[in-house]
Amino acid sequence: MTLIYRCQIELHDSLYFATREIGRLYETEPVIHNYALCYALGLVDSEIYSTTVSEEHSYRYFCPEQVPKYEPHLTALNQQGIYVTPGRSISHSSTLNTWKYANNNYHVEMEKTQKNIPSFGRTKEIAPESKFEFFIISEKSLKLAKWIRLGKWMSKAELKIDEITKFEHKNGDFICSYLLNPLDVMFSHQVISYDVVNMPPVSLIQNIKIRGQYYKLEEIKIGEKYYKLENIQLPACMEYRFRAN
């Protein structure tokens, strides 16, 4: 059984992570990587996850080193049949913040200095009330928290989930207007054309012409009402894949 959920996030704090660094400007692209969403949604820290990942790779209680463990963490979601797409902006605005710090060379090995030169940097963040959208494809029913945390500042965001009640499983050429992780889709599909969104740890793609199996989403339940959907198509058979070392 395949279940598809449409998820929307509304920010209640400004969202910051460094998509790109331009001199002293650290810019946040209005895109949320699907790796980040898996952690924010609590899928990595679920009870099922803790039984499929060794203590060596667990961040549940203690993180001994600042080294990401994407492959063992997200491979556990493959085993559970859960896949989260990257989040795209529905509506957003940005804020520019300036931070300052002083040159504290005199704190290092008692180094003498006659100057205390201030320095600065800027962060371009996504403003509160901005909204994002993504999908979860799952082999089982999911219950997720209403409030989640995102980004470097652990910004608060509200999560709304609606189930896709009617969709078709098809095969052939189609257009996907949503963001995708190329590593997760290029193994099972033929990607014909796309635009790149550069960001770490894996750049994403959008405006994609693609060939292979896909879901055509037709109806969604919001509250107690059902609404028709048009021109929403997502690749089927997606799972987390990683570059060979």
Image (cartoon, rainbow, N blue to C red):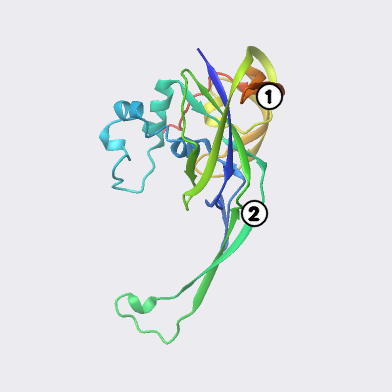
Image position, residue 144 (x, y; %): 47, 31
| Residue indicated by mark 1 | 232
| Residue indicated by mark 2 | 94
Viewer-closest of 214 and 150: 150
- Is 40 placed left or right of 108 in the picture? right
Q: Is residue 184 above or below residue 107?
A: above
Residue appearing at x 62%, y 48% in the figure? 129
Q: Amino acid at mark 1?
A: Ile
Viewer-closest of 55 and 45: 45
Q: Give the tally of numbered discs.
A: 2
Residue 60: mark: none
Residue appearing at x 54%, y 52% in the figure? 16
Image position, residue 131 (x, y; %): 63, 42
Point out the residue furthest to the right here: 230
Q: CA distance from mark 1 to mark 2?
A: 27 Å
Q: Amino acid at mark 2?
A: Ser
The tag earlier along the polypeptide, 1 or 2, is 2
Viewer-closest of 180 and 220: 220
Image position, residue 170 (x, y; %): 64, 12
Categorize mark 1 by other alpha carbons within 10 Å: few (<14), some (14-19), many (20+).
some
